[in-house]
Amino acid sequence: MQYFEDFAVGQRFSSGRRRVEAAEITAFAAEYDPQPFHLDDVAGQASVFGGMAASGWHTAAMTMRLLVPSAFQPAGGIVGFGGELAWLKPVRPGDELCVESEIIATRPSQSRPGQGLVTVRVTTLNQHGETVQTFTPTLLVDRRPR
Amino acid sequence: MQYFEDFAVGQRFSSGRRRVEAAEITAFAAEYDPQPFHLDDVAGQASVFGGMAASGWHTAAMTMRLLVPSAFQPAGGIVGFGGELAWLKPVRPGDELCVESEIIATRPSQSRPGQGLVTVRVTTLNQHGETVQTFTPTLLVDRRPR
């Protein structure tokens, strides 16, 4: 577990890998993003994606599932206020995703003396090394107890 | 359905409502964000959330589920490059969410003559009228066929 004081700009953390199954893409889409190009390959081919693609929210959720058990373990949990989210390439059935996290800023919290703010660039890559998503949240991280 | 030409800055679109059940919060968290404060009320009370709270990614996914059948129906589907995402308040079991969308910018695409770019502020509110999430994506929207 890393306290606020343990983080420094430039530190990097890697995740494991996760294979994206077609059935999971359609199940997530049916529940949360029921648009044809996330549910059906023919509709996907007729769309801007050129084939069935995972919902961006599914990619974001799978990214979180890779991040939670990764080497990045901020004290107090991964608790974010949000940040800039970008989807750069479609995620396809059979893709294998992994996540690289890099600390890009740290600063004490003005309002919470027991915590600090850590900004991390979370990059989601596919099996070709292509970036499919980036997310740059600012997280609330506990300080080391005295 | 709205083509690029149909959108103008200041237009607003409302969604229906969705009640957030505790069982859905824990099911989503177990699959995609298995942190204790999303899975258990006692752990939630010991956390910065002060009680069990939905994963931010669950809030984002529920927002999308409200948006897809709403009055906002861009031609070609809701297809985004991403944008700024902010979580402002915890989402709790029993909350009832709705989504308000407002067009804040439109411009032709330089690289895609058949499409334009529409930036929309998507605000997710709870039953008290409090904003729990904002997301400001830029979307790719089909132009009206000649």
Image (cartoon, coloured by chain):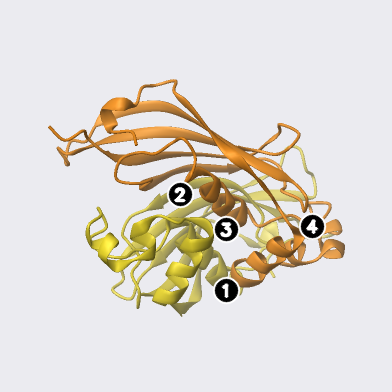
Chain colours: A yellow, B orange
Image quarter of the C terminus of chain B: top left
Residue at numbered disc 4:
B52
**Residue at x 46% of width, y 62% of height:** A29
Which one is in front in this view, the residue at disc 2 or the one at disc 4? 4
For mark 1, does the 10 Å Cα neighbourhood hold few (<14), some (14 to 19), or many (20 or more) residues?
some
**Residue A8 circle label:** 3
Q: Chain of mark 1?
A: A
Picture residue at 28% right of the left edge, 33% below the top: B3
Q: Is residue A45 left or right of residue A56?
A: left
Kindly state the secondary structure of the residue where label 3 is placed.
loop
Asked if labels 2 and 3 share a chain, the reply is yes
Instruction: Report whether residue A12 is seen.
Output: no
Marks 2/3: CA–CA distance = 22 Å
Under mark 1, the amino acid is Ser
Disc 4, SS: loop
Q: Position of residue A124 (x, y in %)?
A: 42, 64
Label 2: which residue?
Answer: A85
Q: Are marks 1 and 2 in contact (CB under 8 Å)?
A: no
Distance from the alpha carbon under mark 3 to that under mark 1: 17 Å
